[in-house]
Amino acid sequence: MPHIVTAFDDDLIAIQAKISEMGGLAEEILSSALEALKNRDADLARIAIERDKKLDALEIELDELATTTIALRQPMAQDLRVLISALKIASTLERIGDLAKNVAKRAIYLSEGKPGRISSSLVRMGQQTMAQLTEILDAYVSRDTDLAVAIWRRDAELDETYNAIFREVVTYMMEDARTIGLGSQLLFIAKNLERIGDHTTHVAENIYYIVKGEPLGDDRPKGEPIGLDLTF
């Protein structure tokens, strides 16, 4: 018997497409911010900042679509989990966009100051964060719980990278007070990247919940990021 596409199916497809669009945009903003940082490109950083407005608008659109679908269709079981998780993931992607925007803002500040050495460790952390975001979005599309769990567990590596950068930069700042301005900016960038990593684990937890119907758990290997307690 052929599958009959219902209005509810159309709603689910539209919601999934909106999540994919948000994910792609979050990747674009982070990639541009990191490239702007690496190349001291203020113009590219401003483009990344401007693109975040579209991500905010998409979250509002998805929120309206998902809540309306829940109210009208009264879904059950996995369909309900998909919709609830879509709301959570959209909020998470919006926060990732905000954090990437913050990196872009710091990139502008650094591009306008005296040339300073950008820690190679920070560049690697940016690449690590970008890869983690890309992989978790792939896992969402494919409903790959194995990949989601692997990313969830691997976030501790990002925490340790952040801690290493923190110690490295603070050492420079203590040795030469002239590096304090640059160093503080680098520390804020590293903290934003560490927080993006945390948010990718939230997406992983939602992927697991959609497929398995139960929480992933609270035993994720977790580093202990030091300093700079930012709230997003």
Image: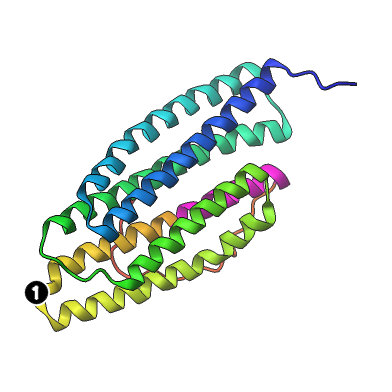
Q: Residue at x 67, y 20 (%)?
A: 8
Which of 228 and 12 lies nearest the eye of the viewer?
12
Verify whether residue 228 appears in magenta.
Answer: no
Q: Which residue type does callout 1 highlight?
A: Arg
Identify the image quadrant of residue 109. bottom left
In the rendered structure, the answer to whether residue 96 lies left or right of residue 83 reads left
Q: Tell me where residue 165 appears, x and y as whole percent.
A: 33, 73
User: Is residue 232 visible in the rendered structure shown here?
Assistant: no
- The residue sitting at the bottom extreme is 175
Residue toward you, 13 or 202: 13
| Residue positioned 12% across, 55% down in the render | 112
Q: Is residue 36 visible?
A: yes
- Position of 73 with respect to 52 (left or right) is right
Q: Quadrant of the N terminus?
A: top right
The x, y position of residue 55, in whole percent, is: 39, 35
* Residue 185 location, quadrant: bottom left
Residue at image x 51%, y 57%? 132
Q: Which residues are magenta?
A: 197-213
